[in-house]
Structure formats: structure tokens, C-alpha cells
Amino acid sequence: MFLPLLFMVFISVKAVEQNVSCPYVTPREVDLKELDGKWHLAAVATDLDIKGDCATILFNHKTNNTTDVSISWIVDNTVSFYNGSVALTVDGDNGGDLLLVTYTDKKSETYSILDVNYEHYAVIFACYNNSDGNTSTYELWKLTRMPHVKKIDSTKIDQAVANYNLQNTPFLYFNNTEDSCRINIGSDLNPSSWILTSTAAITLFRRLY
Ligand SMILES: *[C@@H]1O[C@H](CO)[C@@H](O)[C@H](O)[C@H]1NC(C)=O
Ligand SMILES: *[C@@H]1O[C@H](CO)[C@@H](O)[C@H](O)[C@H]1NC(C)=O
Ligand SMILES: *[C@@H]1O[C@H](CO)[C@@H](O)[C@H](O)[C@H]1NC(C)=O
Ligand SMILES: *[C@@H]1O[C@H](CO)[C@@H](O)[C@H](O)[C@H]1NC(C)=O
Ligand SMILES: *[C@@H]1O[C@H](CO)[C@@H](O)[C@H](O)[C@H]1NC(C)=O
Ligand SMILES: *[C@@H]1O[C@H](CO)[C@@H](O)[C@H](O)[C@H]1NC(C)=O
Ligand SMILES: *[C@@H]1O[C@H](CO)[C@@H](O)[C@H](O)[C@H]1NC(C)=O
């Protein structure tokens, strides 16, 4: 009982608590249309239970000016989703744009963008001051358009993170390799992994056993 619990503490990355209050984020205008499309998650520090080595975020901007978001991750070639909708809201402190994401389970979170180059990368941040007045809790997301982070982008991302003194964040990294990003559908079906991932097959296997 004790050991698995200890193990979990080491492998799961949570929102991070820091001993200073939330940094002042330089106000920025956000263009939801430009954010549209698929992003790969390069690294994250969040309470969301994202697993595996391949994770993506899809922003889907609709013609009626609404935007859906879908966070997905792949474990054993099986994809899981956490979906929601995005609205822009104005930061009362600095007048910049914030992303207000309402997830399908009714949880919501307000994110600011620390830096973005819509064609290449985005650094997304959520932070709450704790009630003690001098500590805060934050989440940090590094998004890239390419599955593998290019050197020039990673320099920009690291700079954005360091600008807010968040460089010591314990990140969970995703390598987004072709293998780990493969989903078993249709003709891609691989019999050996199918046995592992299909609940029906597992049930059948147990019955036969
Ligand atoms: C705050 O945390 C940093 C790094 O985690 C540490 O170096 C620093 O001494 C801490 N400051 C205080 C006042 O506790
Ligand atoms: C957190 O507290 C600091 C210092 O009091 C303040 O400047 C900042 O605006 C607060 N940030 C948030 C997100 O509440
Ligand atoms: C916008 O369009 C989508 C489908 O394209 C629909 O599901 C959604 O309800 C619409 N939202 C509004 C506010 O009209
Ligand atoms: C779409 O939404 C954005 C941000 O919410 C707003 O600034 C813009 O005016 C809207 N455009 C239309 C055509 O409704
Ligand atoms: C989440 O959104 C993705 C992409 O739009 C969709 O394929 C998937 O079925 C959705 N999943 C859930 C659980 O809503
Ligand atoms: C935070 O505030 C509490 C009470 O106001 C104080 O005791 C503590 O030393 C402060 N911690 C830091 C790191 O400033
Ligand atoms: C990601 O790649 C690095 C370097 O190639 C490797 O050390 C690490 O184990 C990989 N992570 C996962 C989860 O496969």
C-alpha cells in the first residue's frame, strides 16, 4: 500500500506550488483563429492526469466564432480525451486576453499565454495566489506545432519560462515519437497490441483461461 503510493508521487506531475505570488504577466492580445489546429504537447506541469509519451491539443475554431479544445494522449496505442470549449476573457489586472476553458466535466480554468508564435510554439500558464498571501500554485504547458521541438523554438520557450522565473518547474515531458503516437484503428490494427488494449479481447482471454 505504501510503496505504490510513494511511486505515484514520483511519476505524476502536478500543478506546482511556489513560494512567491503569481508573476505579473505581460498583457497580450490572443487570436483564437490563429491558435486553431493541432499542437503537440512538449511538456506540462498540471493536475490533469495526462499519461504516456504522446499528447496533443486540438483547437477547433468554428464558423460561429466558438472554439472547441480537445486534449488527447495515447497510452498503448489507445487515445484518451479531455475536451472543452474556449472563450476569450479580459484579465482584470492588466487588460490582456485570457483563455477561459470550460471542460466537459464543468471544471474551468483561466490561462494566460506567456509567449506564442502561432506557427511554431505557445507557452500557456495558469496561476492562483494562495490565501497565505505569499505563495501561489500554477500550471504550465509547452505546446509546439511539430511533434519534435526544434532547437530555435525550445530556446524561445525556455526564455519565456525564464522571464517569469519558472525555469525550475518539474515538467512531465512528451517525446511524441511515431511509435508512441500511433493509434490502433482499422488496418493499423496490430494483433499483439490489440490483445493488450481491447477490453473485449481481455475479457475473452480471461474466459478462455
Ligand atoms: C523559495 O524557493 C526557492 C527555490 O525553490 C529557494 O531558493 C528560496 O530560498 C525560497 N525562498 C524562501 C524565502 O523561502
Ligand atoms: C497575486 O498576488 C500578487 C501580489 O499581491 C499580485 O500582484 C497579482 O496580481 C496576483 N495575481 C493573481 C493571479 O491573483
Ligand atoms: C456553434 O456551432 C457548433 C457546431 O458547429 C455548435 O455545436 C454550437 O452549439 C454553436 N454555438 C453557438 C453559440 O451557436
Ligand atoms: C469573435 O470573438 C472574438 C473574441 O471573443 C470577438 O472579438 C469578435 O468580435 C467575434 N467576431 C464575430 C464575427 O463575432
Ligand atoms: C473530444 O474531441 C475529439 C476531437 O474533436 C473527438 O474526436 C472525441 O470524440 C471527443 N471525445 C469526447 C470524450 O468527447
Ligand atoms: C509568508 O507569510 C507568512 C505570514 O504572513 C510568513 O510567516 C512567512 O514567513 C512568509 N513566507 C515567505 C516565504 O515570505
Ligand atoms: C524521451 O526521450 C529521451 C531522450 O531520447 C529519453 O531519455 C526518455 O526516456 C524518453 N521518454 C519517454 C517517456 O520515452
Image (cartoon, rainbow, N blue to C red):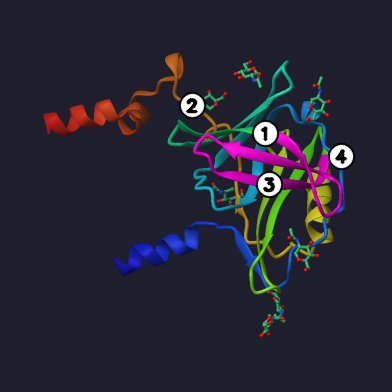
Query: Residues under labels 2 and 3: Cα distance?
Result: 31 Å
Q: Main secondary structure of the magenta part?
A: strand
Q: Is residue 196 left or right of residue 159?
A: left
| Residue 76 sits inside the magenta stretch | no
Q: Which residue is mark 3?
A: 110
Q: Is residue 86 left or right of residue 93?
A: left
Q: Residue 99 in the image: state x and y as whole percent.
A: 72, 40
**Precedes in sequence: disc 4 or disc 3:** 4
Please report contact status of discs 2 and 1: CB closer than 8 Å, yes or no. Answer: no
- Please give the range of residues in magenta: 87-116
Q: Residues within 10 Å of mark 1 (few under 14, many from 20)?
A: many
**Precedes in sequence: disc 1 or disc 4:** 4
Q: Which residue is mark 4?
A: 29
- At a point 70% along the width and 65% down the height, the residue shown is 168
**Precedes in sequence: disc 3 or disc 1:** 1
Quadrant of the image containing the N terminus: bottom left
Tell me if residue 154 comes above or below residue 193 in the rendering. Answer: below
- At a point 52% along the width and 39% down the height, the residue shown is 106
149 and 102: which is toward the camera: 102
Query: Residues under labels 1 and 4: Cα distance?
Result: 15 Å
Q: How many marks?
A: 4
Q: Residue furthest front?
A: 92
Query: Residues under labels 2 and 4: Cα distance?
Result: 36 Å
**Precedes in sequence: disc 2 or disc 1:** 1
Query: Residues under labels 2 and 1: Cα distance?
Result: 26 Å
**Looking at the rendered structure, which numbered label has been put on residue 183?**
2
